């Protein structure tokens, strides 16, 4: 309100270009009132006045301005002033600014930042975490769609300095919408009078800014490109992702998957950068789940304590049985998680995988079960240790291994499919989780087989 009342006086100072008097007057006013004074001024005048304000005051005034005025002021500021403005603005207002600015203005703003500041700005752009918008760079070269090949080459010579890559050029219309892309080599070899838009050397492929990391990594693998353009919902080119960015993203994705397979949450930062408290938070959740799961193993053992009391030697084979199931399950889940990640298998292939793993589980179980049977048969003093029915004990152990290994491979292979079907990351079907699940069922399978075979003999 005060700004509107004093507006005629400020208009006179502006007309007289009395910048010192304006600076002194603004220093005593609230930022909201200063915003009222410059709100309706032309872009060139508001930009000049904005430069008179101290850095912290300028950021506060900027936050009170309407979006269209903010856009106009950004267009008048230099690189250093843009950096200062972003540094001083509150994070939520900075995010809103970057989201509401036109794509071309956003690109200019991003190019004014250092690599470290660019990383921060990406995080504030409002794009989902791990999306293409977080990895794109604004250092690319566009050419107008009305140029010929010869004119486009001249344009590249005059505008290509400092770009991250000019191997691929992006053709846009007057509104910044992506029309096509063309390789520099194709442009060089084309007739100079051919329109750039008529040079069709390959299919145009673009990435939505909201595409997740796994999606744009797979697009690079599929189309074998060194760079892909990133567009917003209106088809406006807002950045590009280059192959070096994809390598970084793929490394991050693989690191997170490996950490999850190990039975913990992804660290999302280098190991030594995570504090002890943060490390505990990342690891305690799954450890708690696994610990509770192992309690069911103890419960299952307690249920069969009568059988164990009658033949104490039966408990000696429990670690052998459950480790065989856990190891086979861990193998299977690791294989299927990777196969899903590289698209060797799809969700619709679950039944094929199930059939293969059942067959593999039976074959592996028969081999390991035979080893267990022979171990009992060939152990010195087997009659004294296992009693006169040691052959039946060996058979019970062998068949138990077959059942547990088959269940472990089937469970380990199907869990990633189930998680993917539920929209979750298959990597969370970690080897420790599968091993814990198989431990419980392994005890039940073992003592069920033992009870059926040894009742009336050793029991």
Image (cartoon, grey):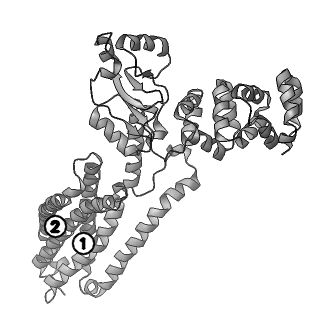
**Residue 376: image location, x then y, percent:** 15, 70
Q: Is residue 46 above or below residue 385?
A: above
Quadrant location of the C terminus?
A: bottom left
Say few, some or many: other residues with alpha carbon within 10 Å of mark 2 (under 14 / 14 to 19 / 20 or more).
many
Side of 370 relative to 228 (left or right): left
In depth, the one of 364 and 161 nearer the eye is 161
Residue 85 sits in quarter: top right
Does residue 289 appear to the left or right of 311 in the view shown?
A: right
Q: Nearer the viewer, residue 66 or 301?
A: 66
Disc ID at residue 317: 1
| The label number, if any, that marks residue 239 in the structure image | none
Give the secondary structure at mark 2: helix
SS at circle 1: helix
- Residue hosting label 2: 372
- The quadrant in which residue 422 appears is bottom left
Above or below: residue 117 compared with residue 96: above
Lower sequence index among marks 2 and 1: 1
Q: Is residue 268 above or below residue 14?
A: below
Which residue is rendered at x = 40% and y = 32% of the image?
Answer: 229
Of residue 442 and residue 131, the one placed in the foreground of this image is 131
x%, y% of residue 457?
Answer: 13, 87
Determine contact: label 2, label 1, CB under 8 Å.
Answer: yes
* Residue 71 position within the rendered picture, expressed as x and y whole percent measured from the top left: 63, 34
Q: Residue furthest front?
A: 8
Horizontal relation, residue 398 to residue 223: left or right: left
Left or right: 97 with respect to 405?
right
Q: Position of residue 83 (x, y in %)?
A: 66, 30
Q: CA distance from mark 2 to mark 1?
A: 9 Å
């Amino acid at each position: 309100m005060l700004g509107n009342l004093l507006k005629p006086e400020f208009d006179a100072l502006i007309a007289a270009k009395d910048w010192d008097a304006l600076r002194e007057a603004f220093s005593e006013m609230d930022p909201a009132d200063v915003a009222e004074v410059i709100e309706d001024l032309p872009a060139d005048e508001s930009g000049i006045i904005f430069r008179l304000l101290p850095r912290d005051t300028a950021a506060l005034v900027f936050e009170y301005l309407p979006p269209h005025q903010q856009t106009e002021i950004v267009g008048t500021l230099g690189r250093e002033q843009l950096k200062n403005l972003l540094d001083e603005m509150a994070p939520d207002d900075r995010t809103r600014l970057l989201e509401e600015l036109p794509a071309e203005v956003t690109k200019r703003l991003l190019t004014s930042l250092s690599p470290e500041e660019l990383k921060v700005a990406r995080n504030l752009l409002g794009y989902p975490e791990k999306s293409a918008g977080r990895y794109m760079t604004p250092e690319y070269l566009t050419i107008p769609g009305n140029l010929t090949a010869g004119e486009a080459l001249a344009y590249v010579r005059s505008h290509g300095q400092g770009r991250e890559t000019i191997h691929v050029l992006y053709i846009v219309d007057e509104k910044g919408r992506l029309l096509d892309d063309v390789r520099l080599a194709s442009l060089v070899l084309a007739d100079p009078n051919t329109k750039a838009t008529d040079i069709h050397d390959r299919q145009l492929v673009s990435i939505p800014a909201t595409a997740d990391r796994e999606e744009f990594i797979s697009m690079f693998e599929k189309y074998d490109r060194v760079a892909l353009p990133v567009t917003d919902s209106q088809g406006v080119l807002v950045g590009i992702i280059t192959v070096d960015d994809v390598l970084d993203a793929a490394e991050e994705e693989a690191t997170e998957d490996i950490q999850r397979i190990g039975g913990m949450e992804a660290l999302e930062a280098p190991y030594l950068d995570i504090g002890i408290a943060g490390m505990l938070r990342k690891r305690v959740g799954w450890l708690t789940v696994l610990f509770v799961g192992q309690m069911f193993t103890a419960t299952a053992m307690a249920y069969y304590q009568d059988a164990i009391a009658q033949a104490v030697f039966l408990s000696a084979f429990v670690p052998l049985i459950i480790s065989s199931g856990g190891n086979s399950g861990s193998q299977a889940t690791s294989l299927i998680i990777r196969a899903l990640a590289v698209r060797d298998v799809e969700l619709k292939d679950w039944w094929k995988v199930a059939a293969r793993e059942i067959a593999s589980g039976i074959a592996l179980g028969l081999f390991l079960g035979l080893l267990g049977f022979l171990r009992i048969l060939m152990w010195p003093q087997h009659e004294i240790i296992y009693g006169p029915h040691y052959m039946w004990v060996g058979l019970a152990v062998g068949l138990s291994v077959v059942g547990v290994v088959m269940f472990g491979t089937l469970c380990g292979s199907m869990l990633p499919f189930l998680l993917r079907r539920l929209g979750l990351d298959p990597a969370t079907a970690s080897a420790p989780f599968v091993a814990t699940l198989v431990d419980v069922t392994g005890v039940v399978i073992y003592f069920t087989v033992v009870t059926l075979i040894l009742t009336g003999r050793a029991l």
